[in-house]
Amino acid sequence: MARLELDRLSKRYGDFHAARDVSLDVAEGEFLVLLGPSGCGKTTTLRMIAGFVEPTAGTVKIGGRDVTTLPPWKRNTGLVFQNYALFPHLTVGQNVAFGLEMRKVAKAEADAKVLDALKLVQLDHLIDRLPRQLSGGQQQRVALARALAFRPDVLLLDEPLSNLDAKLRHDVRVEIRSLQQRLGITTVMVTHDQEEALTMADRLVVMRDGAVRQIGSQKDLYERPADHFVADFVGRSSFLSGTMAGDAEMKTAGGLTVRCAKSLSGPAVMALRPERVYVGREPISGQDNTFPGEVEFVSYLGSLIDIHVRLSPQDRVIAQVPNHDSAALPAVGDTVHVGWAATPAVFPADSDMRA
Amino acid sequence: MTGAAVTHTGKAARPGFRLRPGRWALKAAALVAFIYILTPLIFITWLSFYSQEIPSYPPQGYTLRWYGQAIGNQRFIDAFVISAQVGILATLIGLVIALPASLGLARLRFFGRGAVNNLLLMPLIVPGIVLGFAIYVMLVEVAIRFEWNMLNSFGGLVFGHVLLVVPWMVRLIMASLAGFDRTLEEAAMNLGANRLTTFRRVTMPGILPGIVAGSMFGFVASFGNLELSLFLVGPGRTTLPIAILQYLQWKIDPTIAAISVLQIIIIAVAMLITDRFVKLSRVV
C-alpha cells in the first residue's frame, strides 16, 4: 500500500506524443480511474507505471521511491491484464504462487498466502485446475488473486472487465471495488467505459491525445466538465454552438440569444444535460432560457423518454423526461417549449470536436 | 476434451442424407494422398517377408530371415550407431544455434533480418548433393590454408548435418513463437521475474512443442540423409543410408527391405512418443 506519484510523465514515439506531461497524485488506498477513448494515452501511462514503457521524460514514484528507471520486476506492482495472461502450463495455485515464489517466500507461508488470495476471490476450490478449464469470469478472478497475493504496493487494472459479458461485468465491478476497499490498496484502472469508471472510482482522470483533460470526482466531471471534450465524453449532452455575445450571453448559430453562467469571448460551445432541459406546452417559467421549438424525434427508452427538439435550423437540444404519462407525450411535429437554467458548461469551441 | 461430445451432437442434429459435396471432395483428396504416401511403405513391408532372395512376384513363401540378416550385419549396426550419434550431436548443436536465432528473427527488427531468415532456411532448398560438394570443397580449402584437416572426419560429418537440422528447427520454433502470447512474459516480469527467469519459466514451456518438434524433424532429416553424407563420411565410418546403398551395389535381397522397415518403425515410434508429450499437429 503506497502513494503513487507521477510527475510530468511523457512518452514520445518520434513525432507522436503517446503521453504528455501526465501528473497524478494517487493517495494511499485510493481507486483512480484513467478514462478516455482508445489512443488517449491511458494504457501508455499504466504501462509506464508498471515499467513496460520507458518514459521519455518525467518520474514515477511509488511510496516515495523513485522507480522511473527500475525494470518491471523491481517495482512491486500487481497488474491485471485485459486478456488475464494466466500461465497456461501452470495450475491456478501455481499461477497465484508465482509472485511469492519470485520473492523467495518460504513454501509453507506461500501456500497459506495463495489460499488466502484465492479465498478473497472465492476460487480456493479450483486451486488445482488449469486456466483453460475455467470460465472467463473465473480466469479474471484468478488474475486478480495472482496480482494481489504478493501484496503489491499498487494494483493496476488494464481494462479488466472488457472481456466479460454484460451481466458478469456488473457483478465483477462491485466485487473488485469492495475487495479494493477492504484491502485498502492503491489502485489505478484503465478503461474506456465511462459507466464502469463512474461506478468504481474514487477519482477519475479524463485523458485525450496523451494529455490529462480533467481530474475530479464523478460529480466534478458531470456537473463542471472542464472542456467540450469532457462534457461530450462523460455522460450525455446536447450541444449548442455559437459566439459569445456579451456578459454571460451566447448567440447561437441559429440566432438565439442564450444566457449562461460563465463569461468568455469568441466562438463557444454550450453543453446541456438532457435531464436538465424541461419541456412543456407553454413557455417554461422559472428558467433562465425558454424557447419554442418543433419536436423532431421521440425516443422511447421505457422509464425515460428522449425528446429531440429543433429550436432553429441550426440549433437542436435533447430533453430527457420521466415517463409519467405516455398519453401526454408530445408527438413528432408538435410545437413545444423547452427551458433550462443558465449553465457554466460553456467552453471555447474545440477545433477537433464536432459541435 | 469436449470435442467428441460436440461432434456427436452436431451430427445428430443434422438431417440424415444431405449432400455435402465439399466435404466429400476433401475426404476423397485426403484418401488419395494417404494411399499415395502409404503404398510404397506397404509394399516394402510386404517384400521384407518374401522368402526368395531375388524379389519377384508372386512370393514363394514368407520368412523372418531377412530381419535376422539385417540385425546380424555388423556393417549395418556400426552404420546405425554412427547415424544415431551424428543425428543426436547435430540436433544438440543445431538447437544451440536455432533457438537464439529464432528468438532474434521473431522478435527483433534489424537490418538484414530477411536475409538471415532466408539464409537459415536455405539448406532446405539447396539440393543435398550441391550442399555436400560445397562443404567438401570448403573443407579442402580449410585443410590447405589452415592445416586443419576435417575432411572425412566425424567432426566434418556432424558439421554438415547441423546444416540439415537448423532449418527445420528455426521453422518450427519460429512457428510456435508466432503463436506465443507475449503478455505472458509481461505478466511474469510484473510478478517479479527478471528476463532470464521469465524465459526459463514462461517462454520455454510455451514454445517447447516447437523445440521438440523441430528437434525431432531435424533428427529425422539427419538420420535419413544420403547425398550430403556421401561427401563427408570417412573410411570405416559410414551412415546407415550409405551402408544400405553400398549393400545394394552388389546385392538386392529383401535384407534392404527389412532394414528399411526397421528404420520406419524407429522413426514412427519416436514420432508417436513425441506426439504424446507435444501435439505435433499443433505445430506442424
Image: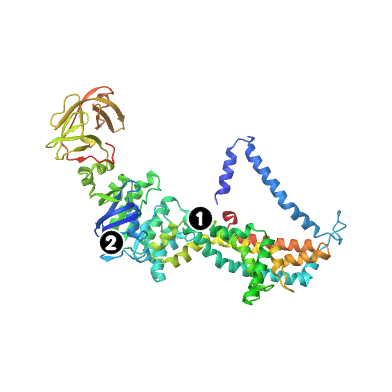
Q: Is residue A171 above or below residue B68?
A: above
Q: Does B59 sit left or right of A214 as displayed?
A: right
Q: Residue furthest bottom?
A: B147
Element carrying mark 2: strand
The answer to whether residue B213 is seen in the rendering is no
Q: Chain of mark 1?
A: B
Residue A109, image x, y percentages: 38, 69
Q: Which mark is residue A59?
A: 2
The quadrant in which the C terminus of chain A is found is top left
Way the structure is coloured: rainbow
Give the amino acid at mark 1: Ala
Residue A171, image x, y percentages: 35, 48
Q: Is residue A311 above or below residue A19?
A: above
Q: How many marks?
A: 2
Read off the residue under disc 1. Answer: B178
Q: Chain of mark 2?
A: A
Residue B24, image x, y percentages: 66, 40
Q: Does A225 sit left or right of B79 as displayed?
A: left
Report crowding for label 2: few under 14, some 14 to 19, many 20 or more residues within 10 A (C-alpha).
many
Q: Nearer the viewer, residue A59 or A297?
A: A59
Q: Which mark is residue B51?
A: none
